Image (tube, coloured by chain):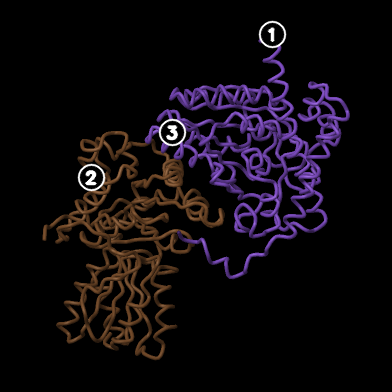
Amino acid sequence: MPALTYREAIRDAMSEAMRRDDDVFVMGEDIAEMGGSMGVTQGMLDEFGPDRVRNTPISEMAIVGAGIGAAVSGMRPIVEVMYQDFMTLAMEQLVQQAAKHRFMSGGQIKVPLTIRTQGGAGWSPGAQHAQQLEAWFLHVPGIKVVFASTPADARGLLWSSIYDDNPVVFFEHRTLYNLKGDVPAEIDGIELGRARVHREGEDVTIVATGRLVHEALKAAEEAEQDGISVEVVDPRTLLPLDEETIVASVRKTSRCVVAHEAVVRMGFGAEVAAIVQHQAFDYLDAPVERVGAKFAPIPFAPVMEEYVIPHAEDVLAAVRRTMGKD
Amino acid sequence: MATLEEKGQSASTERLKEFLREMLLIRRFEEKVEERFRAGELPGFLHVAIGQEAVAVGVCRALEEGDVIASTHRAHGHTIAKGTHPNEVMAELYGKVEGTSHGYGGSMHLYDVERGNLGANAVVGGGLPGIVGAALAFKLRGEPRVAVAFFGDGATNIGTFHESLNLAQLWMVPAVFVCENNRYAESTPAKQHLPIEDMTKRAEAYGMTSMAVDGQDVEAVYEAARKALKQARDGRGPVFVVADCVRLSGHYVGDPQVYRPKEEILELRKSRDPIELLRARLELADEDWEEMDREATRIAEDSVEFAKKGTDPRPEDALKNVYA
């Protein structure tokens, strides 16, 4: 199996789709000569030319909207929105247009649009370049939401997103781009709506997304030293959500921790907690614990940033609480 | 023997009669919409384009097979002019399965993709970026098609308008932007929302070909639209068309129009009604006019009958069509 970085894996999915299919193209700010602000599209301009690797003005509404119009007209566009913080600028087009065209037309239209965006704290970009806003999109019927945490998942899930007939918001985490991992020799889709169990365990289930998958795996290693057996589940697709795998895991372990980098309040973890208490109530031996950022914008000063966002030790503390060991 | 010029004139007269027939149909249809809304039969929120029929008909008659449009909250006229049968439009307003969107859309979300209507939009300016994208798809595939956005003067104040025109011109996509300049953004008159008089400047700022036309003159609209569509189709870039028009009705059906002097509407009805202007110009005999009117009225009435006999959707079907 070849090893790719998370960044290369994402590029590989886009490039392979563009080689196979003229309907696929990519557009966004600084993605051509510069290769994207995170270097994800590096080299693609040379291979595919400026018609299919399109630099755009700084116009998030128009580029997401143009993606919608092209998708409705038979293309499979990939729009890169440089930071998920800037998705705020495109919300009308995404929420009012992309998510609803199929519904409002009574099924006449499909919108096979993929919006790739990235974000995440841990490098002091300050409050307007580091948020994790995925929960906003989970509240909107009509779109799908993906958040990959490994190179293999990023490639397979992006492939499926490109070929999905619905608008998909594909989240990448800023701190994972250099993470290296094995990917299958042949590119293949990973079904949207299927979780990955990263590690099996008996005592506690951690449901984690994005960067927190890796923090959860670290916490699980440490918990094991303490004799606590931890299962780590990454839903990978937040909408649709693989409730079955999450609930089955919690029914086995009887304890659940949900971990994400976004703020805890009204976050993805709240929905998971609701699902778990409803579908595994009789199995639970402890309240569902939520781990996430403290309720503040992401601060600049590194010491403050570190304080606000969650780490492996926060996940471990939550695991220990569910075991009555705090 | 008729001279070529005379033959041309008679073809043009025939075409104008067709335009009149269609404008009158839209008028009678929308009057029926007002009537049935007041009778309490139509749910929701309705906007008629009474007074603006010449823009819908003049532009849509200039389109070619394969061209697409995006419409606004004031969409009945555009939709009928783009070829959707009034029965299907009325059925949608009644929330019936036989409606254009099978009851999922309503008056502000009329779609007819088969006929090139990519959807009416209840967000002012919401459809413009999509039209740029549709035009981009046509350009990338080398198809000789044009994408047309309808919107009002109010929409020229929202960001999507500016971002879309900039992008369209930058990429030279085959798009035409038709601004129905009725001088009201809902209730707010132009002097309170537009800092400039000459709306063509809006597009000139982006280096776009920009033209103004009398939106009450259907022939002028048709000719301007043909010119604009040709430029776009030939790959010479998008065009902005400002159609100066008048809204002879309120913003929504039932709008008491407290913001507008009563005399203004009465005066405009007398002097600027596009249907009356064209009727006078064609010097139609009374009996020809009456026959045309009877036919339009009958189609409008039939659409109500059709809609009332339509099928109510099953409530649980509300959960369909959320995802493809």
Q: Amino acid at mark 3?
A: Leu
Percent across and percent down for residue A138 are 44, 63
**Colour purple maps to chain:** B
Is residue B142 toward the left or the right of residue B114 in the image? left
Identify the residue at the far right of this view.
B286
Q: A211 left or right of B27? A: left
Indicate whether A74 appears above or below A300: above
Disc 1 to disc 3, C-alpha distance: 47 Å
Q: Which mark, residue A192?
A: none
Give the quadrant of the N terminus of chain A. Answer: bottom left
Towards the viewer: A211 or B238 = B238
Q: Position of residue A102 (x, y in %)?
A: 51, 55
| C-alpha gap between disc 3 and disc 2 | 24 Å
Chain A on-screen colour = brown
Task: Check disc 3 and report the residue beneath it.
Answer: B167
Density class for disc 2 (Cα within 10 Å; few <14, some 14-19, many ≥20) is some
